[in-house]
């Protein structure tokens, strides 16, 4: 029997984050031991990004779930708590991911 793959949901705020996450997956997840689903909220405020990430699960909780998003605007405490309750890690870009590209 084959061992179960570890599953990951890597969700980004916008298309730039999605491209960055896909690059990381293609560079570092070249193993059959992990299955990574990437997605993007297409922008929006922090609460809507979290809501879209939860919907992207399609009812299937992953072993690891995280969202890569800007820290501006500030994340509301209720949104941080919801993410924690859902088991979703928030990874902040300060000031934003696009500032790292020429």
Image (cartoon, rainbow, N blue to C red):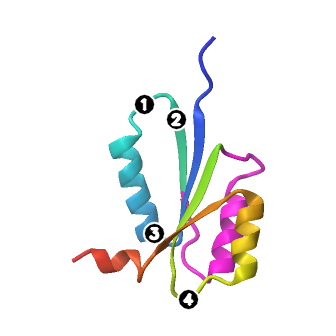
Q: Mark 2 points at which residue?
A: 34
Instruction: Find residue 62 and report its horizontal and vertical position in percent.
Output: 67, 45
Give the number of the disc on residue 15: 3
Q: What stretch is highlighted in magenta?
A: 39-62
Query: 91 or 49, which is in the foreground?
Result: 91
Q: Which residue is located at x 72 percent, y 47 percent? A: 61
- Spatial CA distance of label 3 from label 2 is 23 Å
User: Dividing the image into 4 quarters, which one contains the C terminus?
Assistant: bottom left
| Element assignment for label 4 | loop
Query: 62 or 90, which is in the foreground?
Result: 90
Give the number of the disc on residue 87: none
- Determine crowd level at label 1: few under 14, some 14-19, many 20+ residues with C-alpha closer than 10 A: few
Q: Are marks 4 and 3 in contact (CB under 8 Å)?
A: no
| Element assignment for label 3 | helix
- Spatial CA distance of label 4 from label 3 is 18 Å
Discs 3/1, front: 1
Q: Are marks 1 and 2 in contact (CB under 8 Å)?
A: yes
Q: Splitting the image into 4 quarters, where does residue 52 fall? A: bottom right
Q: Mark 1 points at which residue?
A: 31
- Determine crowd level at label 4: few under 14, some 14-19, many 20+ residues with C-alpha closer than 10 A: few
Q: Which residue is located at x 59 percent, y 35 percent? A: 6
- Determine crowd level at label 2: few under 14, some 14-19, many 20+ residues with C-alpha closer than 10 A: some
Nearer-N-terminus badge (4/3): 3
């Amino acid at each position: 029997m084959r061992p179960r793959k570890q599953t990951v949901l890597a969700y980004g705020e916008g298309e730039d984050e999605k491209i960055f996450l896909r690059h990381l997956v293609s560079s570092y997840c070249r193993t059959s031991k992990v299955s990574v689903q990437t997605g993007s909220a297409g922008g929006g405020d922090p609460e809507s990004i979290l809501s879209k990430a939860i919907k992207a699960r399609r009812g299937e909780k992953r072993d690891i779930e995280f969202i890569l998003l800007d820290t501006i605007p500030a994340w509301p405490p209720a949104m941080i708590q919801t993410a924690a309750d859902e088991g979703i890690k928030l990874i902040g870009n300060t000031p934003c991911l696009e500032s790292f590209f020429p």
